[in-house]
Amino acid sequence: MALSYPVFFALYTISMVVGVFVALLIFIGWKDMNWRTTLRSLRYNAVYVILIAAFPLFVQVQDILERQFEEGSSTVVYTNWIFDLAGDTIGVLQDRLNYAVLIDFFIIVYAWVFAFITYLVPIFLLVKDDRATLRIYAIAMMLNYIVLTPFYLVFPVTVTGSHPDAGVTPFLYASRSWGQMVTSVDPLDNDFPSGHVSLSVTPLLIFAFARLQYRRMSWFLGGATTAIVFSVLYLGVHWPADVFAGFILAVAATVAARSERIQMTIDRYVRIVSQKLFGEKPEGTPGSKQI
C-alpha cells in the first residue's frame, strides 16, 4: 500500500531527527554531549545559526525571483550549451546501471542524505562547541549561496532528465513520493553550478582541514559526498559541467572562509549583532576556539 504524501513527509521528518541524534551518539558519544555547553555555544553563535537556517529559504525566494525574470528561450539556449559539453554521457551511464535497487538507493542519497548532512554538521559543531569551525562553515555556506543565487537567476539550466536529446531517464522525478518532495521546492532549472555538490563538498573540505579528532566525521562526509555526486548524475538531475562547477565553487568558498582576514571582517559584524541581541561582549579572536 502506497503512503500518502503527508504521511511520507512526516516519516521523512521523523527519520531526519532520529538520524541526527543517532549520528551525534556515534560521532560524539552520550557522555561527551553536554547540553549546557551546547546551549551556551548556540547563544554565542546565534547569528551564524540564523544565517545557516535561513539558507534553505533563499531557494524559495530565488524561485519567486526567477519567475519574474524567467525567459524560456534563454533556458533552452543555456541548457544546450551545457549539453554540448557532455552529450549523452549520462544516458550511457544510466543504461549500464539501470537497476531498481540502485535507483532507490541513490534517490535516498539525493533527497535524504544531502539534507541530513545539512542539518547534522551545524548541530555537531554546536554540541562540540567548536566555534572556530562553525564560523568557517557558516561563512563558507554563505559564500556558496552568494554565488549560486545569481547564477540560477541569470543562467538557468534545466535538469538532464528534461533534455530531449540527452537520452536521460528522470529516475528521481518518476518516484511518486520522493519526486513530489523535490519538485515542490525545486523549479528544475537551478542546475549550474550544482548546489548539491558545492554544499556537500564544502563541509567535507572544512572537516578535512580541521583537527584529527574529526577524522571519523571526515570519512563519513567523504563517503556521503561521493554518493551525492554520483546520484545527481545518475538520477537525471545534473550535467557533468554542473558537478565540476559545484566542486570548484566549494573549493573557492572553503579557501575564502578559512582566510583570517575574511573571518575577522565578517565576525566583527556578527559580534555587533550578537551583542545587541544578548548584550554579550566579544570573547576572543576568530582564530581561537571559545569554550
Image (cartoon, rainbow, N blue to C red):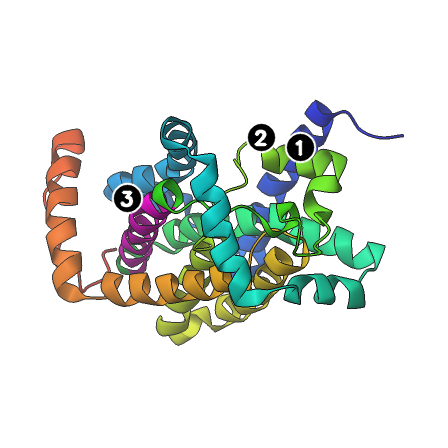
Residue for badge 3: 48
For the residue marked with disc 3, what is the amino acid?
A: Tyr
Between disc 3 and disc 2, whose residue precedes? 3
Q: Amino acid at mark 1?
A: Gln
- Decide: marks 3, 1 in contact (CB < 8 A)? no
Residue 264, numbered label? none
Q: Is residue 94 above or below residue 126?
A: below
Q: Are marks 1 and 2 in contact (CB under 8 Å)?
A: yes
Q: Is residue 33 left or right of residue 107?
A: left
What residue is pinned by disc 2?
A: 184
Q: Which residue is mark 1?
A: 180
Picture quarter with the N terminus = top right
Identified by mark 2, the residue type is Ser
- Residue 267 on image: x %, y %: 16, 50
Q: Which element type, helix, strand or loop, lies under badge 2?
A: loop
Q: Which residue is at 45% across, 50% downward?
A: 78
* Image coords of residue 84 (percent x, y): 53, 63
Dot in front, 3 or 2: 2
Overall secondary structure of the magenta section: helix
User: Residue, x 79% and y 64% (percent of image)?
Assistant: 95
For the C terminus, which image quadrant? Answer: bottom left
The x, y position of residue 115, in whole percent, is 54, 46
Q: Secondary structure at mark 1?
A: helix
Magenta stretch bounds: 133-151
Q: Secondary structure at mark 3?
A: helix
**Label 3 vs 1, first from the N-terminus:** 3
